[in-house]
Image (tube, rainbow, N blue to C red):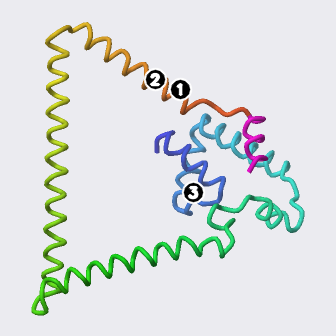
């Protein structure tokens, strides 16, 4: 057994999760490897120290913490607050059903529903084709603009690349910036 595997097994053994067969293999390795035995002794000492520093939690602590947490956005609303959105949803759904029914009635009694479904599918296909054509034209335009930029002055391209990298770096710095504890507490208190 190599020492890296042994050290992984030591962690599992200290947590009581190592199977008996692997525990015997681990004991055999520890008998011949002073470095791994030292790692096991340090881990056992750390666990003993942590076990001695456990704090007793008062009864009902979990419930008190859960009650102190602010309600989620949808939980904070009173049931009457949902009346307007539900009414609007029903109104829009009813209007869509009425329009579908009217368009189906105009197609005739013989194939109203299949004709309306075909018309909706044709509308969807047309919008997808128009959208893909617009996207292709946009990419072609972007490619032409980039080609002109490279052909006219390579220094402009380098400046654009440096600006782009600087903006990415700034964005990453802002995303990774730690929030000071007093600022975080201040925000929490304003909710």
Q: Measured from the top left, where is residue 175 in percent x and y?
A: 54, 33
Nearer the observer, 77 or 123: 123
User: Which stretch appears magenta?
Assistant: 181-191
Label 1: few (<14), some (14–19) or many (≥20) C-alpha neighbours in 10 Å:
few
Check disc 2 and report the residue beneath it: 169
Mark 1–mark 3 distance (CA, rounded to whole Å):
46 Å
In this picture, residue 100 sits left or right of residue 16: left
Is disc 1 placed on a helix, strand or loop? helix
The residue drawn where x is 59% and y is 51% is 27
Q: Which residue is mark 3?
A: 23
Cα distance in 3D space between marks 2 and 3:
49 Å
Which is more N-terminal, label 3 or label 1? Answer: 3
Q: Nearer the viewer, residue 182 or 132?
A: 132
- Say which quarter of the image contains residue 81: bottom right
Depth check, mark 2 against mark 3: the one in front is 2
Q: Is residue 126 left or right of residue 98?
A: left
Q: Which residue is outermost to the bottom?
A: 109
Q: Mark 2, residues whose alpha carbon is within 10 Å: few (<14), some, or many (≥20)? A: few
Q: Are marks 2 and 1 in contact (CB under 8 Å)?
A: yes
Residue nearer the viewer, 144 or 54 = 144
Mark 2 vs mark 3: which is more N-terminal?
Answer: 3
Q: Which residue is identified by label 1?
A: 173
Relative placement, left or right, of 26 versus 127 is right
């Amino acid at each position: 057994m190599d020492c890296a595997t042994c050290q992984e097994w030591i962690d599992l053994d200290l947590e009581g999760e190592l199977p008996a067969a692997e525990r015997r293999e681990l004991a055999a390795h520890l008998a011949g490897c002073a470095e791994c035995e030292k790692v096991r002794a340090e881990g056992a000492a750390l666990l003993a120290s942590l076990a001695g520093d456990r704090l007793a939690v008062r009864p009902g602590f979990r419930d008190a913490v859960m009650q102190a947490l602010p309600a989620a956005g949808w939980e904070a609303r009173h049931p009457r607050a949902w009346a307007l959105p539900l009414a609007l949803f029903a109104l829009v759904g009813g209007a869509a059903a009425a329009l579908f029914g009217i368009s189906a009635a105009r197609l005739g009694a013989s194939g109203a529903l299949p004709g309306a479904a075909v018309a909706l599918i044709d509308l969807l296909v047309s919008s997808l084709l128009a959208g893909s054509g617009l996207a292709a034209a946009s990419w072609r335009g972007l490619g032409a603009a980039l080609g002109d930029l490279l052909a006219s002055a390579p220094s402009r391209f380098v400046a654009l690349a440096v600006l782009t990298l600087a903006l990415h770096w700034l964005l990453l710095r802002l995303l990774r910036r730690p929030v000071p504890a007093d600022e975080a507490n201040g925000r929490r208190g304003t909710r």
